[in-house]
Image: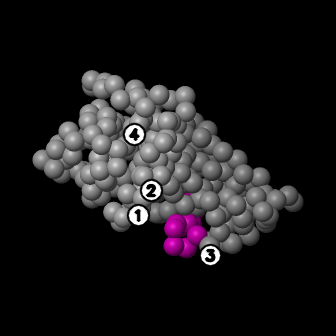
Amino acid sequence: MGFGKLFIVSTPIGHLADMTYRAVETLKSVAVIACEDTRHTGILLSHYGIDKPLTSYFEHNKHFKSRGIINRLTRGEDVALVSDAGTPGISDPGYRVIHDAIDAGIEVVPVPGASAAAAALSVSGLPTDRFVFEGFLPPKTAARTKRLAELTQETRTIILYESPHRLCRALRDIQAVFGDIFMVCARELTKKFQEIRRQKVSALIAHFEETPARGEFVLLFNLRTQRELSP
Ligand code: SAM
């Protein structure tokens, strides 16, 4: 018997219906699903009537769990990897087991779908022909400012992920490094309280100082295109 396949399966970033047919079929077909949080993924699986064993694979057990997953694959079992939201490997654990699987001669199969970066870019109104995904900025101000300063000459659209409790600090650092630039702030994409703000960074800071930042955020800007767009 040959090796199994490792399927990298994207799941919704909010709206449960943003699951592809192929993602559902794949999750129904594999022997086991590796996921970050078994309770969180359990909700998605029960919504789609998928009854499969789950095994946890997250940031702090990824080295150890990767070995177990590779063992199953080499025994001929198909395995699916999902994360809590969106595409595994995009600011989510995935790299370790994908790297190890390729190293072991196992086929890795993409089952593409939602990702917050692509969703935000698609509605931003900013240039999409060339863009750069910077993921999460460092949490501390000094390192964050340094990372931002490295981007001063960047001409492509820049995409960042940010957590709600660091949002205002990150926006202030962006203003300190680049000035009062025009930005797009995409909050809670595909969810009930989705909000896309296209404003100067000073206006975003004023807004989120007034209205506490809640939910999940993608920030985008293009240092060359500074023409403001309305909603
Ligand atoms: N793997 C995911 C993807 O493909 O987009 C990203 C996971 S990362 C741990 C979580 C971050 O993604 C959040 O802090 C936020 O920056 C962004 N994000 C995820 N879902 C989002 C949503 N519905 N709206 C806005 N941002 C979102």
| Image marks 1 and 3: residues in contact by CB distance under 8 Å | no
Q: Name the residue under label 2.
A: 147
Drawn side of residue 83 relative to residue 162, left or right: right
| Image marks 2 and 1: residues in contact by CB distance under 8 Å | yes
Drawn side of residue 82 relative to residue 211, left or right: right
Drawn side of residue 180 relative to residue 89, left or right: left
Q: Label 1, secondary structure: give it.
A: helix
Task: Kindly give the residue lying farthest to the right in the view shown.
Answer: 1
Q: Tell me the CA gap for discs 1 and 4.
A: 19 Å
Q: Nearer the observer, disc 1 or disc 3?
A: 1
Question: In the image, is the residue at mark 4 within 8 Å of ligand 1 by its beta carbon?
Answer: no
Query: Residue 60: x and y, percent?
Result: 51, 73
The residue lying at 55 percent from left, 33 percent from top is: 130
The residue lying at 27 percent from left, 23 percent from top is: 230
Q: Tell me the CA gap for discs 2 and 4.
A: 15 Å
Q: Mark 1 points at which residue?
A: 143
- Residue 220 disc label: 4
Drawn side of residue 117 relative to residue 169, left or right: right
| Residue type for callout 3 | Phe
Q: Name the residue under label 3.
A: 64
| Residue 41 inside the magenta-drawn segment | no
| Image marks 2 and 3: residues in contact by CB distance under 8 Å | no
Question: Which of the 4 quarters of the picture holds residue 152?
Answer: top left
| Image marks 1 and 4: residues in contact by CB distance under 8 Å | no
Q: Label 2, secondary structure: give it.
A: helix
Mark 1 or mark 4, earlier in chain: 1
Is disc 3 surrounded by few (<14), some (14 to 19) or many (20+) residues within 10 Å?
few
Question: In the image, is the residue at mark 2 within 8 Å of ligand 1 by its beta carbon?
Answer: no
Question: Which of the 4 quarters of the picture holds residue 189?
Answer: top left
Q: In this view, does 98 lie above or below 67?
A: above
